Image (cartoon, grey):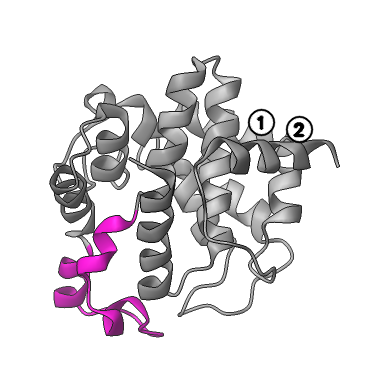
Amino acid sequence: MEPERIQAIISQIERKDMTTAAHTWRVALYARVMAEDAGLERNDIDRITLGAALHDIGKLDVPGEILRKPGPLTDAEFAIVREHPANGHRRLLELGVDDEIVLDLVRHHHERWDGLGYPDGLAGEQIALGPRYFAVIDAFDAMTSARPYRTRIDGQAGELAMRELKTGAGDRYWPQAVEAFCDLRVSGRFDWIIEHFSDEQALPAFSADSDAMRLADSLRTL
């Protein structure tokens, strides 16, 4: 898929969901760093980065008033939200995307290690590696960034989020993914992402082209 097409789709998602461009950059770059740390080939790293950036494309089918609701969702509203991974998978197929890594990450990023996730109720090693790791990334970013129902973030949010991830290891999350993510955060490998891609900063929509990736990667050394 062409970089311009990717950027246009992600801009649509951000407008609909009222997430910031920073959220997309963060989860994509967290995924990129984790994939690099796991020793994956460059092509697979790029594919995981793209899947992470497109993970919420299915939210284009969720009514805006549900996405932006400041209070708890009703059961009916949550049932609609739960459809977004399958809808995202369908949208990508309709766009001609046939990359298994990208499709798996979009469809299965809300599956749980214990089989209680959605949309397919996969458990354990039935879940591909990409979604196993990304479930941890997405949860951490959700717990440490602004949302319609939570506009103030406590200064200890990162530590509290890691505690939640560790509590959920073995049930909600693959333990190895939790350990890898927390080790990278404690080591400071994510600090450049948090510093340069905060919600308060005005950032361009995510772009997966090589120039944008080189620019993002260059910030690691600043």
Is residue 71 on the magenta stretch?
yes
Q: The disc labelled 2 sits on which kind of residue?
A: Ser
Image quadrant assignment for residue 199: bottom right
Q: Position of residue 125 (x, y in %)?
A: 27, 22
Residue linked to disc 2: 187
Image quadrant assignment for residue 52: top left
Q: The disc labelled 1 sits on which kind of residue?
A: Asp
What secondary structure is marked by label 2?
helix
Above or below residue 52? Residue 133 is above
Which residue appears at 69% of the width and 68% of the height?
A: 201
Q: Residues within 10 Å of mark 2 (few under 14, many from 20)?
A: few
Above or below residue 89? Residue 20 is below
Q: Position of residue 70 (x, y in %)?
A: 41, 85
Is residue 150 on the magenta stretch?
no
Image quadrant assignment for residue 39: top right
Quarter of the N terminus within the rendering? top left
In this picture, which residue range is highlighted in magenta? 56-81
Asked if the residue under mark 2 is in contact with the one under mark 1, i.e. CB atoms within 8 Å, the reply is yes
What main secondary structure does the magenta stretch of the protein show?
helix
Residue linked to disc 1: 183
Q: Looking at the image, can residue 145 be seen?
A: yes
What secondary structure is marked by label 1?
helix
| Residue 196 placement, left or right of 6 | right
Above or below residue 17? Residue 97 is above
Q: Looking at the image, can residue 111 be seen?
A: no
